[in-house]
Amino acid sequence: MIATEKKSRVEKNAYEVALENFDLAANALGLEDNVRAMIKYPERVLSVGVPVRMDNGKVIRFDGYRVQHSTTRGPAKGGIRFHPKVTVDEVKALATWMTWKCAVVNIPFGGGKGGVTCNPKEMSMGEIERLTRRYASAILPLIGPDQDIPAPDVYTTPQIMAWIMDTYSMNKGYTVSAVVTGKPISLGGSLGRNEATGRGVFYTTVSSCEHLKLPLKGARVVVQGFGNAGSIAAQLFNEASAKVIAVSDTRGAIFSDKGLDIPAVMAFKDRTGTVAGFPDAMRIKPEELLALECEILVPAALENALTGENAHSVRARIVAEAANGPVTTEADRILEQKGVFLIPDILCNAGGVTVSYFEWVQDEQHLFWDAQDVYNRLERVMKTSFSEVLKIHLERKVSMRLAANMLGIGRVAEATKIRGLYP
Ligand code: NAD
């Protein structure tokens, strides 16, 4: 077998997928080569060593990254991930998607992302704080409210954002709230930011149900990854009388055909750290969860959840990509053939960055909004963006993923040309 064939079976890494999706959209848009050369690849990639004194006195060196994919439409914007599988390619992919995502929801930011290869689950609070502050110092030359604004991502929290904000502010000599978003409310965070990603997933799924004339009431929902994005989405589906029949995290998956009591599952997870072992449900295998018959499947964990290997077994009407990159290119094709309606990540989970933008605006203005104001503005942004993507999908007869990429990449290309960034 030749190497490329082998690779397509093994599945591409996230950055290869990001580049491939760019090419598809650029071809569909008929983008000139000059513009492609300007916008396809990251503007800056910083790699840093993060030495941390552990509680036992030993110093361990972690690898960290900050990537600015684009600053054409405004400061780079994107989360920071602390996870054992973080690689520079993963961070480059996530930064690239942030650029298109900010453009899809039409907020004045470019795309960035950061990460440290570590396992915070095996670290004490003190070790995580020292790692965060050292990493923040290392990327300090790149970040700032007008340059690059980090936020939480997988296994990073409002507390971690507070430490980054404090480290940056100590270096400046005064408080700079707007250097990160997703902060605690008492430090200039926005009401509604913590729930924003899940809420955006909910709004775009409601719009999809309206488009497909699928009643949300009683619709069966399956959520892979019961973290920030997944649990809030599950809660909102539950409140809207949909039936959340299964959820999972790294330690297990649970199922109930009557529908799970989501507030009780959330309380159980708060108490025990996992959904596994929740009393009023059946334990199922993680791979069974993705194959459950349902109306709405929400992959809300990590990349590559649905691949060429398992996409055939999906029995959902809608796949709502709460996670970034959960469906590989090969799985995309399979889902499309099966007639599954896909809400692509750069649209579906854009609620998080949208409310991050609201937080940054509030910090810069020193004027804070109430929660309902945040929800109303978020709903407007998500529903408008959904309609714009759907319009391209229907008019150009392209997949929802390609439609979203065409909208986002088209806006960045237009901004690039207007700025005269290429001769
Ligand atoms: P989180 O750390 O709060 O939750 C992640 C959850 O996924 C955890 O419960 C973890 O146990 C679970 N998980 C990990 N691997 C799993 C697996 N193989 N099977 C089942 N569960 C698994 O992280 P989050 O912030 O909710 O992020 C989840 C996804 O959403 C990521 O792809 C992230 O990039 C994306 N996202 C998050 C935000 C945000 O604002 N938090 C915004 C946009 C996109």
Image: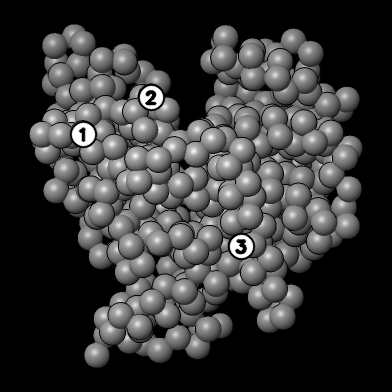
Tell me the quarter of the picture where residue 229 sits. Answer: top right
Height in image: 99 above or below 360? below
Q: Return the mark for residue 186.
A: 2
The amino acid on which the numbered mark 3 sits, given as a three-letter code, is Ser
The residue identified by callout 1 is 175
The amino acid on which the numbered mark 1 sits, given as a three-letter code, is Thr
| Mark 2 or 3, closer to the camera | 2
Residue 360 visible in image: no
State the residue at coordinates (23%, 38%).
176
Q: Return the mark for residue 402.
A: none
State the residue at coordinates (35%, 83%).
418
The residue identified by callout 3 is 385
Residue 130 lies, in percent from the top left, at 21, 23
Label 3 neighbourhood size at 10 Å, few (<14), some (14-19), many (20+)? many
Residue 129 lies, in percent from the top left, at 26, 22
What is the spatial separation of the Cα atoms under label 2 and label 3, in whole angstroms?
A: 31 Å
